[in-house]
Image (tube, rainbow, N blue to C red):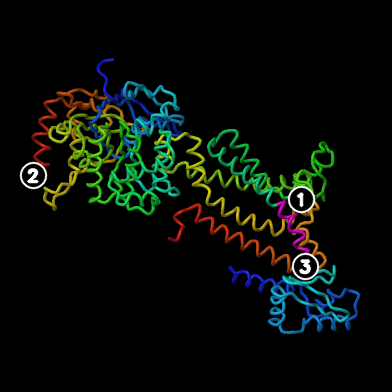
Amino acid sequence: MSQQSFLDVKDLRIHFPTDDGLVKSVDGLTFGLERGKTLGIVGESGSGKSVTSLGILGLHKGGRARISGEIWLDGEELVSASPEHVRGLRGKKMAMIFQDPLSAMHPYYTVGDQIIEAYRIHHDVSKSVAKKHAIDMLGRVGIPEPTRRVDSYPHEFSGGMRQRAMIAMALSCDPELLIADEPTTALDVTVQAQILDLMRDLQREFNSALIIITHDLGVVAELSDDILVMYAGKCIEYGTTEDIFYRPEHPYTWGLLGSMPRLDREPTERLLPIKGSPPSLINVPPGCAFHPRCPYAELTGGKAGTEVPPLAETEGGHLVRCHLDKAERRRLWENEIKPVLETQ
Amino acid sequence: MLAIVSMATFAIFFLVPRLAGATAEGMASRYVGRTATEETAKLAAERLGFNDPLIVQYGRYVKGIVAGAEYDYGAGVEQCPAPCLGYSFITRQPVFPDLMNRLPVTLSLAIGAALIWVLLGVGIGVLSALRRGTVFDRFAMIVALAGVSLPIFFTGLISLQLFAYGNPFNWAAQGGYYVTIEDSPARWAYGLLLPWITLAFLFAATYARLTRAGMLETMNEDYIRTARAKGLVERKVIVKHGLRGALTPIITIFGLDFGLLIGGAVLTETAYSLNGLGKYAIDAITNQDLPKVMGVTLLAALFVILANLIVDLLYAVVDPRVRLT
């Protein structure tokens, strides 16, 4: 095994057998992540982002999912590990922040109780010690009057406070890997920025590896070191944040960038949405999964509809899964896409 | 609460005699006996105040509950100390002490059965939900369907035949066997075993189905995923997070069922010849003993109302979102 990262996902496949056929939610995903770094996973709904994150946490184990591939976390392989062993790592070594903090917290228990529970699963301490810790955590994520608020129920919190509490719960055991699944989607825009700031500060403080899953490129631009663009269960482009924003090579990534509202554009201009909708994961289009929606599919000479393009390196760790050749992609980006995005 | 109780009293007072289809003389003749002459009946009606306006009679009834009453029927005076729920001229006894004698039987029956059916029903419901689609689940749900559909006078008699009269077993007490718990807890339980199981079977079925549906719903909630993501062991995820979320409708139904039951488990008590409130009510109706019918109905209504109140209070304990503050 050559040079292993802190988190190393290799050829991960998560398939769900259903009555209608096999749903290939994640189909051969490979990436790595170091401590203290942030990876953004971007894609439309149904591209397999959330399934990937739940898969890393081992939350598909024991269900109907068929999982293959390898997930190495700090030198330990998780796919073949026993569910009980992975459970022991969950919450302690790796933790998750969910999208909608209202439904993700139990309505019948106080916020404090839920943090205390998370802490006491992995630490053999008394309730009062755990409660002090919970109050401390709530204070650190910026909840005012934590000694009083620790006894509140989730419904007594505002949306932003709930997400802060959720983060406090996830961080209560000082996890080395933190996965945030759409952490700001359910929040007001003003609160979104606060939460993102908070996550960045806490990540620096805890030096944890952070995976942010989102469909919002603004969020990943803010936080990520690297970005992985997913489409139909596969990685279609991977690179540094600069690569993805300034030198994107996949037509799908261009589409995502074109769909992003920006303040520096004229408000009267239209966005450039991607046409069509994401493919069904049961009947993934043959060849390149994106080709039915790709405006440049004809330029590949028919290969787009028959062959699955390989994920190839263009330069310095920037990977693209596309049949168009490199020169062609560069030309399209420089001449056709970039000017449109910029002048708009 | 008090308002509802008095409304119930009012309704019972007006409706029960009228449903029995009685005129003042008719009612009086039931009190003095069918063989009495019309003259005697008329006299009794007058003495007992059946010719007074209804509101006066009602006032007298309520006053009896609070302060006790005396019934002067001409040939003598019967005392009915407070709380007087009426005086039966057929058995020549006030109703309330009767009810209090019968209550322990019904209470024993209801509490024991409730314990069994809640444990059994909720347990099976949880297991069924977790093993949805397996043989266990299908089998449990078929049995539950049978439990819901089979009436007690059927299951009760069958189980008596099978387990009490030696065909083929002789494990349980025969009908009518009741020893108070103060006398001998073991014999008390022995005597009530079959009625408990029969009654519990009926209710456990409902609770199993209800719990299963509730668990299937809550186990798909996001907070269950959160609990798992914390690294909680699955057993705790199920009980502390899943079942807790599914408990609210079960508590509601339980309150109503239990309240109804302690007012008299009519069918079970009849099938097993247990002298509880249900049997008392049936006997009173058969004998057209109106004061008894009214008394037992009022007590049953009181229990249902109490149970509802307790359920409402419990809601606030179970679901913090219901709390007022």
State the SS at label 1.
loop
Check residue B106 for magenta coloring: yes
For residue A181, side relative to residue B187 (left or right): left
- Highlighted range, magenta: B94-109
The residue identified by callout 2 is: A343
The residue identified by callout 1 is: B182
Q: Nearer the viewer, residue A9 or B192?
A: B192
- Whole-number angstrom distance, CA of label 1 to CA of label 3: 24 Å
Dot 2 alpha-carbon crowd within 10 angstroms: few under 14, some 14 to 19, many 20 or more: few
Dot 3 alpha-carbon crowd within 10 angstroms: few under 14, some 14 to 19, many 20 or more: many
Quadrant holding the N terminus of chain A: top left
For residue B236, side relative to residue A90 (left or right): right
The residue identified by callout 3 is: B95
- Whole-number angstrom distance, CA of label 2 to CA of label 1: 92 Å
Which label sits in the foreground, 2 or 3?
3
Q: Position of residue B85 (x, y in %)?
A: 73, 70
* Three-letter code for the amino acid on which mark 1 is drawn: Glu
Q: Mark 3 lies on which chain?
A: B
Q: Mark 2 lies on which chain?
A: A
- Taking the spot 50% from the left edge, 39% from the top edge, the residue there is B238
For residue A258, side relative to residue B108 (left or right): left
